Image: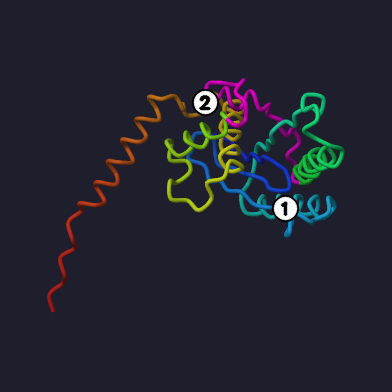
Amino acid sequence: MSPPRVLFVDGGSRFGWCYGPVGSIPISGSDFFAKKAKVASHQMIYCGAQRWLQEFIAQHPVDVFAVEQPVPDSHLKRQTNAATSHLKYGVIACLFAMAGHHRIYRPVEMPISTIRSKFIGRGNLKGEIAKPQILQKCLALGWIPHDAEDLSFDRSDAVAGWYATCLYAAPAIAQPVDDLWVASERRKREAEELSRRYQPAPVPERF
């Protein structure tokens, strides 16, 4: 039986995404659901969310679809408003509806604390502390290239969410991300780079 293929989306007007079979090196990125996101209506963003997922699944089969579980408004005190709440829950509803259209019937909502606990070992850190640590771990693992144009927290948060979902979906085959594993992967990449660098030059053919 092949490993389940997991897609995680950290949704909003700008969103991060991460995809790959459990145990693999994932692909990831970030984007906007609507052009001119700062002035786009909620309706445009909802349509864009469904269109994006429709096009993504057409190219990448998905077995498990997950999103970051929204933080309840009661926990945010004065840091949110009605418009933000409508957008937050509306995007997730649209994504879940499109997932159901593609027969992905049990989407997962992954709590932020669980994501951070599984990926960096601390689920109770505040965002301004946790987000840079998550990005640094993604870089150390080689799951986001150091020279990537997109080094946004939207992207790295989605990678962390993907990993937590992999542990949920298939814990027996999800790779570890502890410090020893990170060091091992770094040495492996360094050895591969040295091997490529010092390969003998091809001998030109005689005329």
Q: Secondary structure at mark 1?
A: loop
Q: Nearer the viewer, residue 107 or 44?
A: 44
Mark 1 / mark 2, whichever is N-terminal: 1
**Apparent side of residue 14 relative to residue 24 in the rendered image (left or right):** right
Farthest left residue in view: 206
Quarter of the image for residue 189 reads top left
Query: Crowding at label 2, few (<14), some or many (≥20) Cα neighbours within 10 Å?
Result: some
Q: Position of residue 83 (x, y in %)?
A: 85, 42
Q: CA distance from mark 1 to mark 2?
A: 28 Å
Residue at the disc numbered 2:
120
Query: Crowding at label 1, few (<14), some or many (≥20) Cα neighbours within 10 Å?
Result: many
Highlighted magenta segment, given as a residue range: 102-128
From the image, which quarter does the N terminus lie in? top right
Q: Position of residue 65 (x, y in %)?
A: 68, 38
Residue drawn 44% across and 46% down? 145
Residue at the disc numbered 1:
33
Q: Secondary structure at mark 2?
A: helix
Q: Amino acid at mark 2?
A: Ile
Residue 181 higher or lower than 40, as above or below: above
Q: Position of residue 201 (x, y in %)?
A: 18, 60
Residue 125 drawn in magenta: yes
Residue 27 drawn in magenta: no
Q: Amino acid at mark 1?
A: Phe
Number of numbered labels in the structure image: 2
